[in-house]
Image: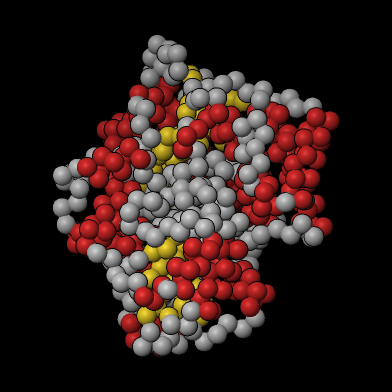
């Protein structure tokens, strides 16, 4: 980096700080009398946009008299200044300053690593004092190495796991020294050490709230976690929410209305843009798909919607297979044996964005895994790469079946009457509109006969539309008082990542009633698992 680049980056951060301080004055709270509630905002695994959203939430919580504490991985003057712009007297904690005896951490880490060395699959279920050590540690390691699975025989991989085991053990010991807060607020809660802080809250009988950017543009989804639901995906509906929707006489007025909305989301690119999933995608017809992929027009077609192999692999639910890579290999094995269908392996398009964010070349890990397992694939099994020009809507209008572990497509395809086979829970399985085999053997048997299955009946399609409508269209809180920016502006360095701006400081106090105020009131006054931006089925 030359001196001009350094000057530019320093100036960009200074400009952003000045702008934020100017805009954020409208959020500065007049403090109320204190309450007995305490909230911890977790920033140990964070980014600039999350910090700004959290700062706005913190201001409103403080306005309500809640005691707010923010925990960073270490001192971070840049991010701390973002908070100080809206809450002058906020308290900061630093994770690296919490005590942990090195000798105790080393002993604990050795225990974790030894279990992993002996049985990687069994290691996933390892817990220590309520901390999900196995899932948290494995998620972190495969994410770092950008691999679908680990090999106990690979010394380099095991060296990374042992190093990460020491960090996890240290995190466990440090988290035990944290005070117990009434509520924790997280954006990222799956990777260490955020995962250990999350686990401490829910195992202590407290609540943890996670928010994520919704698939829809300019919107956020929030979910409240306790021990009973800590494996659920943030976009999943709680049993209580789904039961109310199922029993409502207004469930969904017309199936076609939901399908029309779903089509418009893809066609008009109203969603999935934060990860550039629709960038460069076009809608093409049936004949073009057949020609481009070399499919047999006389056969039905099934699509295997692959997950990104190394991201959020073990966060949610339970899976039939040990990881996404093993699921992909076993599913394609079943596809090879069933030549009554065309099979398309659709590599997840987020691979393109994730590689860009990681500063790594875009690798077709799925293709490499399948080549190692099977060599050259037969003519009835095709791979659609992550950077394909074909958008997903094109497939909805052409294919007959879908397969996923727990991807969003499992909510979408059934709205079109198309059967979906899942290989994992934690999202929407078990709600009456997907096929959810309970064992690998049952899964393989179902795939061997997949071509014989008919389209979904009207009642099942209506159920799928109801679920999609509630989970994707009604739960998100549309953000009016602030805007998330996922593409750097011309003057911003790449290190900015995503960002948040307040479009109209003058109208912020009015606009925040639609988002920040709605979210903070739900956090401190409600006890429901799901926050709905729009009341279900209204």
In the depicted structure, whether residue 99 falls above or below residue 236: above
Q: Which residue appears farthest toward the top when viewing the image?
A: 33
Task: Please name whichever residue, 526 or 84, is drawn nearer the observer in this view of the structure.
Answer: 526
Residue 443: horizontal and vertical position, in percent? Answer: 49, 64
Residue 59: horizontal and vertical position, in percent? Answer: 43, 26
Residue at image location 29% in from the left, 41% down from the top: 243
- Identify the coloring: secondary structure
Tell me which corner region of the image, top left, top right, bottom left or bottom right, holds residue 261.
bottom left
Residue 68: horizontal and vertical position, in percent? Answer: 49, 23
Q: Is residue 6 visible?
A: no
Residue at image location 78% in from the left, 39% down from the top: 111
- Position of 261 with respect to 520 (left or right) is left
In the depicted structure, whether residue 379 falls above or below residue 132: below
Task: Please name whichever residue, 332 or 17, is drawn nearer the observer in this view of the structure.
Answer: 332
Tell me which corner region of the image, top left, top right, bottom left or bottom right, holds residue 27.
top left
- Position of 255 with respect to 502 (left or right) is left
Image quarter (top left, top right, bottom left or bottom right) of the C terminus: top left
Q: Can residue 181 be seen in this view?
A: yes
Q: How many callouts does the rendering have?
A: 0
Image quarter (top left, top right, bottom left or bottom right) of the N terminus: bottom right
Residue 396: horizontal and vertical position, in percent? Answer: 33, 71
């Amino acid at each position: 980096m030359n001196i001009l680049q350094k000057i530019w980056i320093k100036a960009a951060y200074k400009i952003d700080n000045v702008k934020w301080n100017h805009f954020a004055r409208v959020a500065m709270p007049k403090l109320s009398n204190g309450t007995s509630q305490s909230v911890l905002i977790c920033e140990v695994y964070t980014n600039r946009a999350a910090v700004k959203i959290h700062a706005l939430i913190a201001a409103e919580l403080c306005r309500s008299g809640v005691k707010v504490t923010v925990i960073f991985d270490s001192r971070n003057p840049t991010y701390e200044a973002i908070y100080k712009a809206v809450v002058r007297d906020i308290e900061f904690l630093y994770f690296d300053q919490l005590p942990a005896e090195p000798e105790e951490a080393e002993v604990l880490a050795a225990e974790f690593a030894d279990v992993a060395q002996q049985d990687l699959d069994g290691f996933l279920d390892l817990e220590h004092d309520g901390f999900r050590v196995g899932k948290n540690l494995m998620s972190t390691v495969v994410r770092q190495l950008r691999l679908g699975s680990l090999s106990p025989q690979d010394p380099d991989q095991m060296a990374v796991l042992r190093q990460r085991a020491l960090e996890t053990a240290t995190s466990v010991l440090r988290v035990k020294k944290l005070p117990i807060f009434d509520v924790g607020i997280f954006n990222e809660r799956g990777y260490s050490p955020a995962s250990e802080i999350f686990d401490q809250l829910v195992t202590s009988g407290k609540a943890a709230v996670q928010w994520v950017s919704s698939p829809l543009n300019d919107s956020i989804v929030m979910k409240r976690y306790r021990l009973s639901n800590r494996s659920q995906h943030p976009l999943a509906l709680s049993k209580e929410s789904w039961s109310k929707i199922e029993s409502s006489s207004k469930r969904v007025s017309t199936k076609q209305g939901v399908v029309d909305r779903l089509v418009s989301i893809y066609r008009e690119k109203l969603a999935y843009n934060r990860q550039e999933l629709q960038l460069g995608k076009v809608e093409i017809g049936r004949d073009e798909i057949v020609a481009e992929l070399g499919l047999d027009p006389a056969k039905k077609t099934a699509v295997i919607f692959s997950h990104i192999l190394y991201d959020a692999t073990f966060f949610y639910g339970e899976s039939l297979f040990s990881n996404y890579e093993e699921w992909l290999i076993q599913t394609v094995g079943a596809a090879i044996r069933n030549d009554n269908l065309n099979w398309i392996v659709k590599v997840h398009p987020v691979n393109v964005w994730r590689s860009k964010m990681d500063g790594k070349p875009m690798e077709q890990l799925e293709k490499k895994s399948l080549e190692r397992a099977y060599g050259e694939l037969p003519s009835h099994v095709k791979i659609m790469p992550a950077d394909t020009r074909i958008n997903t809507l094109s497939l909805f209008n052409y294919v007959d079946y879908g397969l996923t572990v727990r991807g969003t497509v499992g909510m979408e395809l059934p709205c079109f009457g198309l059967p979906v086979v899942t290989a994992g829970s934690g999202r929407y399985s078990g709600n009456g509109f997907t096929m959810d085999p309970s064992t690998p053997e049952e899964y393989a048997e179902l795939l061997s006969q997949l071509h014989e299955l008919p389209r979904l009946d009207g009642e099942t399609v209506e159920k799928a539309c109801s679920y999609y409508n509630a989970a994707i269209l009604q739960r998100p809180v549309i953000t009016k008082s602030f805007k998330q920016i996922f593409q750097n502006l011309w003057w911003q360095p790449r290190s900015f990542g995503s960002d948040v701006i307040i479009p109209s400081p003058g109208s912020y106090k009015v606009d925040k009633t639609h988002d920040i105020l709605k979210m903070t009131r739900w956090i401190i006054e409600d006890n429901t698992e799901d926050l709905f931006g729009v009341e279900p089925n209204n």
